Image: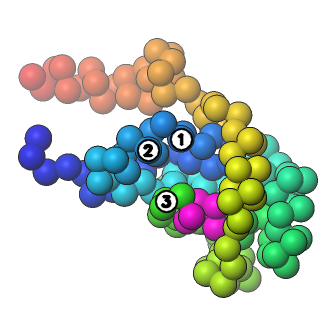
């Protein structure tokens, strides 16, 4: 392959930080975009006390701290919201900066597992890609 992908969208959020994968993509010049930057709001991510404490010290929200942490890692974020006020909140992340200590504190929240499913689990792979893979085999 002579043309590398410009962007790779992979799950990245405070519970699943994918440090090795992000570093690899970035070392290859591939921009990482966070899939589910808020873990789709699952697992009480907006109520996490560590994130809330950091947010309070910047007069920001937990969501803004998550987005800022991703941006400071060089990761592109396109958070999803159907609420206008949250969209406004989510874009207001360019007027503060997390300190190196705060970045390290958030690193310690990593649970090192997908908040949705295991892409390496054969049963999961079958559920997601099974019919497409069978169709590909038939076509070839
Ligand atoms: N997850 C996927 O399968 C998938 C696949 C392909 C592309 N994408 C794209 O990836 C981007 C991220 O979307 P996502 O679906 O993965 O979810 P996400 O951005 O991780 O989280 C979205 C959830 O967070 C809530 N939320 C957003 N801003 C908030 C705020 N400031 N405070 C509190 N709650 C907030 C939303 O609720 P409300 O909407 O009620 O505000 C929604 O429940 C989107 O652009 C999406 O189109 C996602």
Rounded to the nearest whole Å, what is the CA distance between mark 2 and mark 3? 11 Å
The residues colored magenta run 67-72
Within 10 Å of disc 2 (Cα), the crowding (few <14, some 14-19, many 20+) is: some
Q: Quadrant of residue 137?
A: top left
Between 8 and 118, the residue placed more toward the observer is 8
Q: Quadrant of residue 51?
A: bottom right
Which percent across, then down, holds residue 1? 11, 41
Quadrant in the picture for the C terminus: top left
Rounded to the nearest whole Å, what is the CA distance between mark 1 and mark 2? 6 Å
Query: Vertically, is 102 above or below 84?
Result: above
Q: Which residue is mark 3?
A: 75
Report if residue 68 lies within the magenta region.
yes
Q: Which mark is residue 23?
A: 2
Q: Which residue is mark 1?
A: 19
Report if residue 64 lies within the magenta region.
no
Between 135 and 42, the residue placed more toward the observer is 42
Q: Does residue 29 appear to the left or right of 32 in the view shown? A: left
| Callouts 1 and 2 close, C-beta under 8 Å | yes
Between 19 and 138, the residue placed more toward the observer is 19
Which percent across, then down, holds residue 133? 28, 24
Q: For numbered disc 3, what is the local secondary structure? A: loop
Within 10 Å of disc 1 (Cα), the crowding (few <14, some 14-19, many 20+) is: few
> Which-is-in-front pick, marks 2 and 3?
2
Q: Does residue 1 appear to the left or right of 106 in the view shown? A: left
Q: Mostly what secondary structure, the magenta segment?
A: helix
């Amino acid at each position: 392959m002579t043309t590398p992908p410009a962007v790779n969208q992979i799950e990245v959020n405070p519970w699943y930080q994918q440090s090795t994968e992000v570093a690899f993509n970035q070392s290859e010049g591939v921009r990482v975009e966070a899939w589910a930057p808020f873990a789709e709001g699952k697992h009480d991510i907006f109520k996490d006390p560590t994130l809330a404490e950091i947010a309070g010290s910047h007069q920001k929200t937990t969501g803004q701290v998550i987005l800022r942490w991703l941006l400071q890692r060089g990761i592109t974020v396109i958070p999803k919201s159907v609420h206008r006020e949250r969209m406004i909140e989510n874009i207001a992340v360019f007027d503060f900066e997390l300190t190196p200590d705060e970045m390290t504190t958030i690193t310690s929240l990593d649970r090192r597992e997908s908040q949705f499913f295991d892409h390496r689990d054969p049963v999961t792979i079958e559920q997601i890609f099974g019919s497409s893979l069978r169709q590909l085999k038939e076509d070839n």
